[in-house]
Amino acid sequence: MIYRDRYWPRLYPRQCGGQVFWTAGRGFLYAGTRTIVASLWQADDRATSDLMTAFYRSLGKGLFAWEALRAAQREQLEKQPHPFYWAAFQLTGSP
């Protein structure tokens, strides 16, 4: 699983060996990564840390990645009701 945060450079469409890669995430998927958790916007650092801690704790309990992300987001929702703090993350690939 790859976790992409705001510090990764954003890749724009470019030709690579006949393939056009639109995002770093798509490149990882083509390379064989099964699951990517990526932020859609620049999220608060503390909220991201809390959310990722809860996410990996849930994964450790045996939940699927989509269930773990959902549980982590709901946990953050109780702490910070504004979506800016928990809604930035999406899961791409195999759940």
Image (spheres, helix red, strand yellow):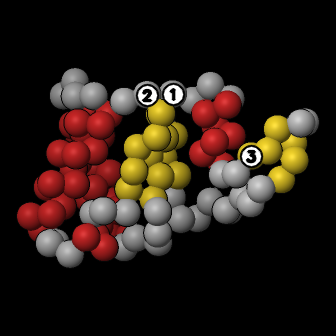
Quadrant of res 11: bottom right
Which residue is painted at 22% across and 24% down in the image?
62
Q: Position of residue 52 (x, y in %)?
A: 32, 51
Using residue 57 as the reference point, say whether residue 95 is left or right of it.
Answer: right
Q: Secondary structure at mark 1?
A: loop
Quadrant of res 49: bottom left
Task: Tell me which numbered mark, 1 or 3, is placed earlier along the sequence.
Answer: 3
- Label 1 crowd bin: few (<14), some (14–19), many (20+), radius 10 Å: some
Quadrant of res 82: bottom left
Task: Tell me which numbered mark, 3 or 2, is placed earlier along the sequence.
Answer: 3
Q: Position of residue 85 (x, y in %)?
A: 28, 70
Q: Are marks 3 and 2 in contact (CB under 8 Å)?
A: no
Residue tagged 2:
94
Report the number of numbered marks: 3
* Circle number at residue 34: 1
Q: Are marks 2 and 1 in contact (CB under 8 Å)?
A: yes
Residue tagged 3:
21
Query: Mark 3 to mark 2: distance in Å?
Result: 19 Å
In the rendered structure, which amino acid carries the disc numbered 3? Phe
Q: Is residue 95 above or below residue 38?
A: above
Using residue 21 as the reference point, say whether residue 24 is left or right of it.
Answer: left
Which residue is painted at 28% across and 44% down in the image?
69
Which image quarter is the C terminus in? Answer: top left
Task: Tell me which numbered mark, 2 or 1, is placed earlier along the sequence.
Answer: 1
* Circle number at residue 15: none
- Label 3 crowd bin: few (<14), some (14–19), many (20+), radius 10 Å: some
Q: Nearer the viewer, residue 72 or 49?
A: 72
Give the farthest residue toward the left: 78
Which residue is painted at 63% across and 42% down in the image?
26
